[in-house]
Image (tube, coloured by chain):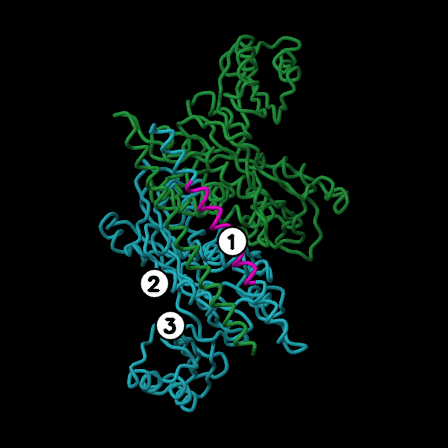
Chain colours: A cyan, B green
Amino acid sequence: MSEAEELGALRDQIDAIDQQIQQLINERARCAQQVAEVKQKYCSPGDSVVFYRPEREAQVLRKIMARNQGPLGDESMARLFREVMSQCLALEEPLTVAYLGPEGTFTQQAALKHFGHAVSCAGQISIADVFREVESGAAHFGVVPVENSTEGVVTHTLDSFVESNLLICGEVTLRIHHHLLTSEPSASVTRIYSHAQSLAQCRLWLDQNYPNVERIAVASNAEAARRASQEPGAAAIASEAAAELYALKPVHANIEDQPDNTTRFLIVGQQPTQSSGDDKTSILVASRNEPGALYHVLEPFHRDGVSLTRIETRPSRSGTWSYVFFIDFEGHRDDERIVPLLAEIQSKAVDFKWLGSYPKAVL
Amino acid sequence: MSEAEELGALRDQIDAIDQQIQQLINERARCAQQVAEVKQKYCSPGDSVVFYRPEREAQVLRKIMARNQGPLGDESMARLFREVMSQCLALEEPLTVAYLGPEGTFTQQAALKHFGHAVSCAGQISIADVFREVESGAAHFGVVPVENSTEGVVTHTLDSFVESNLLICGEVTLRIHHHLLTSEPSASVTRIYSHAQSLAQCRLWLDQNYPNVERIAVASNAEAARRASQEPGAAAIASEAAAELYALKPVHANIEDQPDNTTRFLIVGQQPTQSSGDDKTSILVASRNEPGALYHVLEPFHRDGVSLTRIETRPSRSGTWSYVFFIDFEGHRDDERIVPLLAEIQSKAVDFKWLGSYPKAVL
């Protein structure tokens, strides 16, 4: 056989496979429509039908990754099925997702990574607006950064949960890169601007490469880029987007000390999420400002061997001497071992709020 | 049956379908690997194997859209297969695509729309840099805007083709939205800044809503947003990204007169693309500045009934009194009716350059 014949035969084979895949995807879409019909049939009058089930999606993706034999990688395969589910869901109910904008932000990337590309994304100008859009029902879900300290937004997100009744129903992680930017790459750098958090994330690299250069913390990485564009000898640590906006050039790319510098986002919605079998729970606990307060809150987790994944402390707005702890731990509110633990913590705390149980990030 | 039983049965069915889809996708990936092996076997020493074939992808997507029976829409189905092909290709050869950055630009969106999400995207700070990356082989393909006049880049892209030997091997279209932004939504607007092209794209809306307000054309929409953020009473027409950067609020969203205000991008590469059966060709023709010059160039197209899709005129850099025409028309260089036509135009022109024949945008 010639090259053309060999390739022709393989392409015919691929076309035949594509035809089968296409039939199956449409068959899957019909099943999804039937799921919607069943849900509507059993829905009480006045209640709204919940089409999107985060725990079900997480389970499907985990199964796919577990049984995958290749040659496509597990992540690649899961991403494809994320898109298949996204398109099938759009048939039942086109989802609207509010995110902290503008277009092109990491938060939008997180929204698309979690929901696939068949949703309609609505960028909001503040975290409070994202919460309002979901509370009012204008959006089905919201996506907000929660560990993206460089933009100074973590605390806004946490504080929003104190006032809001929205629940966390998912999490997404993304990798983030920092660059050293100047307007004049050949000139020597006499000072480096950035948000304190970004300076911290690049500390080792700065110590090695610019040990004697002044580091100045400013309000945001965008502000740092603005200054670097105006002051001779100044450089900024910021993203590619900031480089373009202020016509800066990247002198060094990807200078963050941790190569997997990831940022975490939360999905917020109105409905509680059922157990997916591998979940996280977030709670808010207020305690008095007395010695050992945090220790007393954490003790039951330690005793029962429940892993804490994150703790944040915030001053409470309501009492002068009180603190609020935001605690993430492994497990679902309905898990057998978690039910008594939560009851115990609730009984000990001055104030307690369950913020949601949700599947761990799959991708 | 109860709701839970009915849903359980449907979900088992979906899981069974997913398993089949997954097997078929992996089978498809194995075929793609075999295609790569055949190509390598027949590749002459010193030549590099071409894995990505734009015409083949366009054909596959068109077939899928043509035979699609639903319930998933044709576009949704094609998008899914775009991603399947993207992941399969990444197994053969992970593609690097250079685009006009920064991250989050429309050009990046165009790159992902065309190549799917399994490519590695490298943002460049200028169109010249995109061309250089592809010419040097650092990137396999480049993506540049060609009808996105609001960023003032069209002419750069066209002029780049005069000097470069890169070929056009694809086109992508995207929808673009404009918003009216101010820092103080309650204050009255006394002047509106924007790029001339954006002012033109929103002219009817402005005539109706702000008939007596001064319109001032500035260098870019980002510059317009910057001014609106500093001058009381000033508004800007710009994107959502500009709104966030300058802390402006959208007073009115999507104010463009044409609801399908699309922008066109070109894919550039080193290899010519074979006929896909529904193609466009771009050429560059230089002619003397004499009466009827353009008419003489266009006459053969008219005579042979070949549709022109676009003509741009640029002053030539080489001669004082010459012009360069960039012409897009329907058909492929190898099509029977196009071969003699191109020969005729080439014989008439002072200078002639074939910039590429490529599949029409499928999605």
Q: Are marks 2 and 1 in contact (CB under 8 Å)?
A: no
At a point 54% along the width and 30% down the height, the residue shown is B154
The residue that mark 2 highlights is A66
Q: Which mark is residue A117?
A: 1
Span shown in magenta: A13-32
The front one of B44 and A113 is B44
Q: Residue B16: where, in percent of width, then height?
A: 44, 62
Query: In this rendering, do the residues under marks 2 and 3 share a single chain?
Result: yes
Q: Residue furthest front?
A: A1
The front one of B95 and B305 is B305
Q: Secondary structure at mark 3?
A: loop
Callout 1 amino acid: His
Query: In this rendering, do the residues under marks 2 and 1 share a single chain?
Result: yes
Q: Quarter-wise, where is residue A152 in the image?
A: bottom left
The front one of A295 and A40 is A40
Q: CA distance from mark 2 to mark 1?
A: 24 Å
The relative height of residue B46 versus residue B256 in the rendered view (above or below) is: above
**Mark 3 or mark 2, which is nearer the start of the sequence?**
2
The residue that mark 3 highlights is A278
Mark 2 belongs to chain: A
Residue B2 in view, yes or no = yes
Q: Residues within 10 Å of mark 3 (few under 14, many from 20)?
A: some
Callout 2 amino acid: Ala
Q: Are marks 1 and 3 in contact (CB under 8 Å)?
A: no
Q: CA distance from mark 1 to mark 3?
A: 25 Å
| Eye-nearest disc, 2 or 3 | 2
The answer to if A27 sits in the magenta stretch is yes
